[in-house]
Image (cartoon, rainbow, N blue to C red):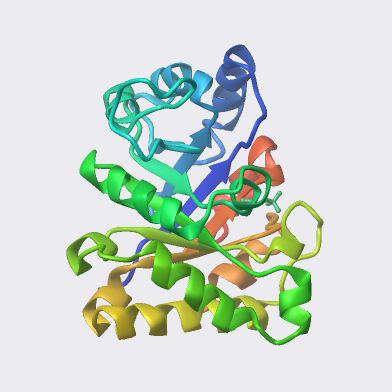
């Protein structure tokens, strides 16, 4: 069975609730595509507004973070129960900005992946190398290391439903897209790793996105790669171009 493509916007720390509502309304006619799962991963304070605004449409809502804890005295944190009850379906875990600026390490991210599943949320788990690592030829070893730790003790049935986003750090927000060959090579290596950790059935089911400066103009070629099942989109997710990315096959 062919994997369904998934295109997710990562809004990062952009859009107030009223701006979020306006963006959803602007994008609504542009992001219809029956062949693709469309997700808006939005700031926590926008979730209620966006869930309401996408009601009855083909768009699902994701969060950008989740607590590794269930509830209690963790000031500033947001639990899986809160996200699920608010109508969230997906959650980004391990974005390079969180790894770098907030020092989230793989053991912590593994706990977050487990929490997401506990609350019925689908993780969009991010991985990717720095420019230095790429230049040293360490890309695939590094991504394998990240994912092995992040997926520790996650059963195959859960892994099969999740999304992995390969995002080379040097391509994020820089306008520098990985070549389709580079993106496909790493996404294939990720699928091979999943087959190694689990089995080929799980590897065939798991969806792997490319992220890093994807635009409407580059999406068709990138998404046509055999191991690339869509994209995680930052900058362009806040513009009309997101509609073009979602409709990459039209
Ligand atoms: P970008 O961001 O599309 O702006 O490069 C991608 C991401 O960080 O998910």
- Relative to 215, is 108 on the left or the right? left
Percent coordinates x, y for residue 232 in the rendering:
56, 53
Numbered circles on residues, count: 0
Rendered residue at 40%/85% (across/down): 192
Residue 163, horizontal then vertical, whole percent: 40, 59
Query: As drawn, is 70 to the left or to the right of 76?
Result: left
Q: In the figure, residue 195 lies in which quadrant?
A: bottom left
In this rendering, is residue 160 above or below 48? Answer: below
Res 228 visible: no
Q: Report the quarter where the N terminus lies.
A: bottom left
Which of the pair 159/153 is nearer the observer? 153
In the image, residue 77 sits, relative to residue 202, either above or below, namely: above
Q: Residue furthest top?
A: 18
Q: Residue furthest front?
A: 73
Q: Position of residue 81 (x, y in %)?
A: 27, 28
Quadrant hosting residue 132:
bottom right
Q: Is residue 60 visible?
A: yes
Residue 162 horizontal/vertical position (percent): 33, 58
| 186 lies left or right of 201 | right
Name the residue located 42 percent from the left edge and 37 percent from the top edge.
66
Residue at left 29%, top 70%?
205
Q: Quadrant of the C terminus?
A: bottom right
Relative to the observer, which residue lies in front, 216 or 184?
A: 184
């Amino acid at each position: 069975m062919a994997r369904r493509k998934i295109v997710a916007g990562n809004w990062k720390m952009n859009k107030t609730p009223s701006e979020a509502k306006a963006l959803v309304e602007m994008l609504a006619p542009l992001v219809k595509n029956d062949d693709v799962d469309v997700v808006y991963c939005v700031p926590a304070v926008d979730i209620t507004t966006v869930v309401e605004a996408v009601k009855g449409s083909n768009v699902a809502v994701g969060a950008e973070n989740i607590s590794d804890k269930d509830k209690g005295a963790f000031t500033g944190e947001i639990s899986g129960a809160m996200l699920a009850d608010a109508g969230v379906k997906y959650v980004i875990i391990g974005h390079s900005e969180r790894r770098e600026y907030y020092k989230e390490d793989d053991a912590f991210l593994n706990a977050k992946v487990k929490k997401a599943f506990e609350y019925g949320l689908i993780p969009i788990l991010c991985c990717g190398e720095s420019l230095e690592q790429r230049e040293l030829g360490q890309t695939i070893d590094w991504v394998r290391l990240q994912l092995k730790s992040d997926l520790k003790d996650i059963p195959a049935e859960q892994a099969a439903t999740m999304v992995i986003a390969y995002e080379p750090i040097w391509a994020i927000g820089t306008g520098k897209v990985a070549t389709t060959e580079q993106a496909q090579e790493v996404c294939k290596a990720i699928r091979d790793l999943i087959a190694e950790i689990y089995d080929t059935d799980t590897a065939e089911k798991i969806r792997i996105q490319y992220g890093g400066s994807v635009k409407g103009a580059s999406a068709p070629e990138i998404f046509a790669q055999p191991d690339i099942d869509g994209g995680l989109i930052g900058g362009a997710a806040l513009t009309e171009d997101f509609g073009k990315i979602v409709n990459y096959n039209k």
